[in-house]
Amino acid sequence: MKKIGVLTSGGDAPGMNAAVRAVVRKAIFEGLEVAGIFNGYEGLIHGKIEMLQLGSVGDIIQRGGTMLRSARSSEFMTEEGRLKAKRQLKSHGIEGLVVIGGDGSFRGAAELVKLGVPCACVPATIDNDINGTQFTIGFDSALNTVIDAIDKIRDTATSHERTFIIEVMGRDAGDLALWAGLAGGAETILIPEVKFDLNEIITRLQSGSGRGKKHSIIIVAEGVMSATALSETLKAEAGIETRVSVLGHIQRGGSPSAKDRVIASQYGARAVEVLHEGRSGVAIGMQNHTVVDYDLDVVFKRSEDKLDKELYKLSKELSI
Amino acid sequence: MKKIGVLTSGGDAPGMNAAVRAVVRKAIFEGLEVAGIFNGYEGLIHGKIEMLQLGSVGDIIQRGGTMLRSARSSEFMTEEGRLKAKRQLKSHGIEGLVVIGGDGSFRGAAELVKLGVPCACVPATIDNDINGTQFTIGFDSALNTVIDAIDKIRDTATSHERTFIIEVMGRDAGDLALWAGLAGGAETILIPEVKFDLNEIITRLQSGSGRGKKHSIIIVAEGVMSATALSETLKAEAGIETRVSVLGHIQRGGSPSAKDRVIASQYGARAVEVLHEGRSGVAIGMQNHTVVDYDLDVVFKRSEDKLDKELYKLSKELSI
Amino acid sequence: MKKIGVLTSGGDAPGMNAAVRAVVRKAIFEGLEVAGIFNGYEGLIHGKIEMLQLGSVGDIIQRGGTMLRSARSSEFMTEEGRLKAKRQLKSHGIEGLVVIGGDGSFRGAAELVKLGVPCACVPATIDNDINGTQFTIGFDSALNTVIDAIDKIRDTATSHERTFIIEVMGRDAGDLALWAGLAGGAETILIPEVKFDLNEIITRLQSGSGRGKKHSIIIVAEGVMSATALSETLKAEAGIETRVSVLGHIQRGGSPSAKDRVIASQYGARAVEVLHEGRSGVAIGMQNHTVVDYDLDVVFKRSEDKLDKELYKLSKELSI
Amino acid sequence: MKKIGVLTSGGDAPGMNAAVRAVVRKAIFEGLEVAGIFNGYEGLIHGKIEMLQLGSVGDIIQRGGTMLRSARSSEFMTEEGRLKAKRQLKSHGIEGLVVIGGDGSFRGAAELVKLGVPCACVPATIDNDINGTQFTIGFDSALNTVIDAIDKIRDTATSHERTFIIEVMGRDAGDLALWAGLAGGAETILIPEVKFDLNEIITRLQSGSGRGKKHSIIIVAEGVMSATALSETLKAEAGIETRVSVLGHIQRGGSPSAKDRVIASQYGARAVEVLHEGRSGVAIGMQNHTVVDYDLDVVFKRSEDKLDKELYKLSKELSI
């Protein structure tokens, strides 16, 4: 193997640049050439490909977003699009591909693997919802962005003795809401993995209020319901006034945290090793404090609940 | 004069604590006693009053929110409520009052002045919308919170080549939107003081897109229209896809910026001086880099436009 | 068991307050009373003890430092001092003690255990140098403070094409330097666990300079040598000009990171469980993504090198 | 005039990039071409010059340092070097020059003005020490970096009940120390403009300690004496133990604050206007909330003390 390619795909996550940097530097360390593929699979199909050098990834480890940019590609959803992609790789002499992104990006890689393109996938999504790895790149950064927002909102909640509902990202996975709620000292945390009981929330708010606790923070993952809907429900069902804050896109941006930069470096380097060893169809991740690589199929299996039940239980006990 | 009181009222703003600290320390420096009135005018009516010492305001200069808390008071809207407030002040031996807050809080103070209570008002609101002062406490902090959010969103906007609409606070005043838009490098800034031309926005987005500019940031003050409404309009009128981010309550919180801590210290100290000199019905502020005090009536006069037209013109020229 | 005590000791670390909060809330959840012991072992000896309620730990999860304060105690170094401490615990009805701190604090706890006082120890130190746990409270926060500093210094290094030497904490353990160097994209990382080769550093700087790389960042743990000494050596041996930055005490402070707040919550809660189960002489920690408790003796054993050799190797490969 | 040049020189300051951006965009808005001169006067002499477009300054408004880099130039100190510089400008068709930097950079510009090169100077230095302007670019950002450090150190000071001496930049000007001390709630502030009285400091520390105040923060500008020297003096003269923190280079870096981005935009645009109007030998600045331009000679005049005496007095009163 002489040349590999690297692309980022799907929603951007802080640390993607650190992963790209690691891929490029590790590849050069191993004596490989690296081609940067811009705008994800869409750019791959249309040959938006440039060679990357050490200098190409200078001064990017601390930047949010992705220097390779990302895009949706409807064309790549078609067999024809994917064959074009394969031809582009061939014509550029690219013998292996590192795909940095989330679940959907990995599915794309799995299709290329079927066409005989060696692929190694690096999990990068703030949702932390990839099977087979305990941490994805971007999760820790987003988490810190969320608690920074909670800390700010708490200033107002305390000063005005109000209840706030803060909506965070997470359609199917409650990791961001759970960790942020625990780290932010939220009184109530609603996540998709656990059916919530409206009466319990109401009782908790009213009993807190009864013993003199005058402000409260509720974290809700977007996959449960919108903060606005919850606010309206609390008003209608129990006459409880709340304020709403939807954190939205700020959760995706910003300089990556130290931890995300480190795991991005670890994952990116491992992805290069995997390709260099001639393997394919592999995802990279972290299990029990160790960098692992595993079959890409593991990602797509209908998994058991990834929820850390101990942590959820702890969040309940501490928000007594 | 032997004893003054201090309260915070209205929406909280970063730097309110620094102002409270300055009031307490300056008063003690001048040989006065200081009573802290909790929960604004509502707490005043109900006698939520405690003496403050140097130690009471230790370690608060850097905290968001207000240690004196804030509240709405419908009772204070009535003559009877205000008379109760006056009686509380008298019974606690409080001979002058520092009111820290926004426009509405100043109106409350003006009513107390009519009843013979000496008041000095310190402008604290992130909206920067108080006549007679170029800067209110909290504006600079909120501004930095907003540009931090814009910087984060720009990461995503750039990576995905998208247009984002970011809604910031400002019902009647566009200062926050204008300064943040300029400092954040926004391509378009919509403020209440300037009627906007939808066609110009569309043309600008399309021509930018035409010359290869693939991402764009629009800042809209809430007083103009909601970001969501603008997004729908752009879609309906010109088929332009945008993403929306409503920054909301995070703008009010957080540790105050250096500048806000400094002006809070200046304003709080001056308010004590004003009361100590036996004056009343005075607002504190900044004019041309100098701390000033001026008649409270100036605040309520239907003012000319406070908008900095030079700055607005500059924002247009630089977003060419 | 009806009542436990909690103290913080040794150098402060971000997240200590989150741990105190978890101890108090978990204890109350379990039906226990909690006494806060102020100023560490010194305060224990002198009975600086107050009962803590849910409200005592409100609004502290996000604060740096420790609300219980910390202190050195020469008196506790004596048998007599420790007997006084034991008597204080007895007279206050405290049947178990949670000690939050570093290595030295744990040794103090071990002495109390010998006197029959049940103790559970929570590791909190930015150095990450406690045997038996992969992460201590405060390490992740300090790490993020360090990379924030590196990012700032890089701005200057790049603008002026200079080499900077940044000295970070770590007398015996290089974790902070290693992680920060990797996350900060440093070209050279010097840690106590690995003997460094001055010639290699010089060669690396000169060859980087030879191929056009004009700025460089060297991270040195204080346990290796001072940044100033290294700077002088590079000047004397190879005529290489460098600038020096000693990060110092800022590394200990600041709002704790999300991760530190979460592990502080986990560790604090587990410490209460351990005492509640009637156990003693136990340290809490994290092993392979799981909260663990283990014999306090493990902490004091002359351990093998804790250095993550894979990570060190990676840092070398990526700084090619 | 058809083409202007822009360079940054001297120590870098946050906001330099925002100023470069404003110069480029304003020039293009005015129909001018802009040449970027890299590495300051040194690069000018050696023709490191590239044309800048709108796209060249995209995504830089938020970045610390300077994309044009900076350097010292001993060659420019000579008549011959300056004549070379003039020839380079001529051969590149550059008819006017915007110089962004501090005092020394302005002196260089004054020399070019003597040789007939139209120059407009934009003040950018964290020291805020340029005559004729109340604010330089970078001061507000550095100030916020310093108070962030003070806030962190205060966590430790409070937890351990210690006195800290924090050394900040400022050889001749105490603005950074004064504002940071006031905003950081420091008990003592030592600046070059005011002779300090060691006995007063000692008395203050001892009396604070006497009335139960157990921690204290002293800010010292580097121009007064080193923090280490002060610490040793306090120990020797009064047996007072202190800890030292030298903030150093982190003060120069980081993303510029909102205010610095705004004034950088204002100053950069005004500099282009000045050149476009055919003027030369002009400095840009802020006086009483208004952007001004004034004769470059004003900068070099032995000025009266720039110190804001009111602010210094306030800092004394509030640290009672």
Image (tube, coloured by chain):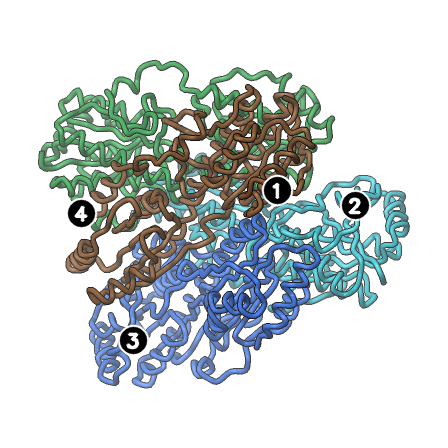
Chain colours: A green, B cyan, C brown, D blue
Looking at the rendered structure, the kind of residue marked 2 is: Tyr
Local crowd at mark 3 within 10 Å, few (<14), some, or many (≥20)? some
List the residue tagged with mark 2: B41
Image location (x, y in percent) of residue B107: 77, 52
Image location (x, y in percent) of residue D75: 24, 78
Q: Nearer the viewer, mark 1 or mark 3?
A: 1
Horizontal arrangement in the rendering, residue A262 relative to residue B251 (left or right): left
Looking at the rendered structure, the kind of residue marked 3 is: Glu
Q: Nearer the viewer, residue B248 or D302?
A: D302
Secondary structure of the residue carrying tag 3 is: loop
Image location (x, y in percent) of residue D20: 36, 63
Horizontal arrangement in the rendering, residue D126 relative to residue B307 (left or right): left
- In space, the residues marked 4 and 2 are separated at their CA atoms by 65 Å
**Chain assignment, label 2:** B
Looking at the rendered structure, the kind of residue marked 4 is: Gln
- In space, the residues marked 1 and 2 are separated at their CA atoms by 20 Å
Pointer 4 and pointer 3 on the same chain? no
Residue A53, label in figure: 4
Q: Quadrant of residue C302?
A: top left
Above or below, C120 against D310 in this view is above
The residue shown at (12%, 34%) is A94
Residue D95, label in figure: 3
**Chain assignment, label 4:** A
Above or below, B56 against D228 in this view is above
Q: Quadrant of residue A243?
A: top right
